[in-house]
Image (cartoon, rainbow, N blue to C red):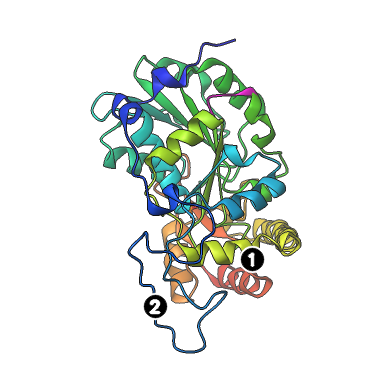
Amino acid sequence: MMYFSINDLVRENIKKLVPYSSARDEFSGEANIYLDANENSLGSPFGKEGIGFRSAYNRYPDPLQVKIKEKLSFIKKVPVENIFLGNGSDECIDILYRAFCNPGKDNVIICPPTYGMYQVSADINDVEVRKAVLLENFQLDLVHMENLVDDFTKIIWLCSPNNPTANSLYREDIETVLNNFPGIVVIDEAYINFSRHRSFIQELAEYPNLVILQTLSKAWGLAGLRLGMAFADKAIIDIYNKIKPPYNIGQATQDIVIKALDNLDDVNEMIKILVAEREALAAVLSELPQVVKIYPSDTNFLLVKVAAARKMYEYLLTQGIVVRDRSNVQLCQGCLRITVGTPDENKALISSMKRFTA
Ligand SMILES: *Cc1c(COP(=O)(O)O)cnc(C)c1O
């Protein structure tokens, strides 16, 4: 077994940190009269009808979002103590930097082309980013990664299925990283619901250094609410909770998420439709003369290599269709990233692309 100690890894200031203790931390039972948090005792200004699921939002929300976590625990088959909820995955990413990376001293490894926030969050926190570019087949360059690791490497960021390349990383490669790197290994599984490969979430007990990120922004159709999830060993979740702002998930978000989590069948239905649309869209687009290549996708988008990417992008804009131009991204030259839309949106995309001539 590789030696791994969370205590050796976490920053000294975080180890010593005395976290803010909110009114709701100090009293979490039931009472009739709450005069402990300087809220407005009279209510919220929504008129007589109120709004949504409750008529008032004048009280601070549950800091640890226990009701959401209990539902997620059931859905994901992970104990509540292994779940952290953030204001989007962005917050789950940022807190890891603040927990483990000393600014100006420590470094992390990312594997481009990949999700942009790992780099942005590092830059904000003044943490060095070392890049092990993916191989031509969009898989990990394990030799390069090993060469980049030194005593100051705290986090390795993996994204699988990866954005923007759409593929899943080889499971054995991820296991190699988990078994040999004595720092934090993050697997961002934002697109896992669209993948034919299984999540690492049932492997949590085996890897004290593993953090899995998921989100309600993609398959769950709740990007507007901002709810990201981190799953990890309790020692890592405790650090997350120590650092996070006391009330990082608002009451309105909590109310709506609790309702949505009861409708897993709706989500599974949408996933089925989107995956079928993805395959159909890929089949039709691959026949177009304007299309050079469609990469296999385990996500709800397609990475499409076209003959004249920038011109195609601009033409689609004139048709009222926005896709993502990735043609300047390393290993993605000539590529557009296209989200799978509704059946009608996909038809409109196909006919616009057919009409385009460079
Ligand atoms: C979309 C996406 C997310 C989601 O971020 P949120 O802040 O939860 O909306 C996370 N990781 C990757 C790779 C993504 O593409």
> What is the three-letter code of the residue carrying label 1?
Lys
Q: Where is residue 233 in the image (x, y as percent from the top left)?
A: 56, 30
Q: Nearer the viewer, residue 117 or 202?
A: 202
Q: Provide the residue designation for mark 2.
A: 42
Q: Position of residue 32 (x, y in %)?
A: 50, 66
Q: Depth-wise, is mark 2 or mark 1 nearer the camera?
A: 2
> Which disc number belongs to residue 259?
1
Horizontal side, residue 287 vs residue 162: left or right? right
Q: Residue furthest front?
A: 32
> What is the three-letter code of the residue carrying label 2?
Leu
Q: Position of residue 105 (x, y in %)?
A: 26, 23
Q: How many marks?
A: 2
Q: Residue at x 45, y 63 (%)?
A: 313
Q: In which quadrant of the rendered view does residue 81 lie? A: top right
Secondary structure mainly formed by the magenta segment: loop
Name the secondary structure under disc 1: helix
Quick check: 130 above or below 92?
above
Q: Which of marks 2 and 1 is nearer the N terminus?
A: 2
Magenta-colored span: 206-210
10 Å neighbourhood of mark 2: few (<14), some, or many (≥20)? few
Name the secondary structure under disc 2: loop
Quick check: 208 above or below 240?
above
